[in-house]
C-alpha cells in the first residue's frame, strides 16, 4: 500500500469533503448522515490497514 504524501493528502481530502457535507446537511436540518458515516468508515479502514503494515 502507498504510504507517501499523496496517500495522506487523499485521506485529508476525504475528511474535508465529509466535514463540509455534514455541515451542509446540518445547516439544512438534514440529519441523515448515513452516506457520511460510510465514507468515515472507509477512511478509518484505510488508516487501520496502513498502520498494520
Image (cartoon, rainbow, N blue to C red):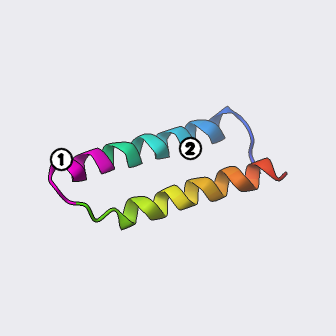
**Magenta range:** 22-30
C-alpha span from label 2 to label 1: 24 Å
Q: What element carries label 2?
A: helix
Q: In the picture shown, does residue 40 fall above or below 16?
A: below
Q: Which mark is residue 27?
A: 1
Q: Is mark 1 on a helix, strand or loop?
A: helix
Q: In the picture shown, does residue 12 fall above or below 42?
A: above
Q: Which mark is residue 15?
A: none
Q: Which residue lies furthest to the right in this view?
A: 53
Tell me where residue 45 appears, x and y as whole percent: 64, 59
Q: Residue under circle 2?
A: 11
Q: On the rendered structure, is 44 left or right of 53?
A: left
Q: On the rendered structure, is 25 left or right of 44?
A: left
Residue drawn at point x = 25 percent, y = 61 percent: 31
Q: Is residue 27 magenta?
A: yes
Which of the 4 image quarters holds residue 20? top left
Which SS does the magenta portion mostly show? helix
How many marks the image carries: the answer is 2
Residue drawn at point x = 47 percent, y = 59 percent: 39
Label 2 environment density (alpha carbons within 10 Å; few <14, some 14–19, many ≥20)? some
Tell me where residue 53 appears, x and y as whole percent: 85, 51
Q: In the picture shown, does residue 5 fall above or below 50?
A: above
Q: Does the magenta stretch include residue 9?
A: no
Tell me where residue 47 appears, x and y as whole percent: 67, 50
2 and 1 marks in contact (CB < 8 Å)? no
Q: Nearer the viewer, residue 14 or 38?
A: 38
Q: Which of marks 2 and 1 is nearer the N terminus?
A: 2
Label 1 environment density (alpha carbons within 10 Å; few <14, some 14–19, many ≥20)? few
Amino acid at each position: 500500500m502507498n504510504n507517501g504524501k499523496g496517500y495522506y493528502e487523499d485521506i485529508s481530502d476525504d475528511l474535508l469533503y465529509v466535514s463540509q457535507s455534514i455541515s451542509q446537511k446540518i445547516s439544512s436540518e438534514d440529519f441523515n448522515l448515513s452516506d457520511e458515516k460510510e465514507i468515515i468508515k472507509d477512511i478509518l479502514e484505510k488508516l487501520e490497514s496502513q498502520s498494520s503494515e
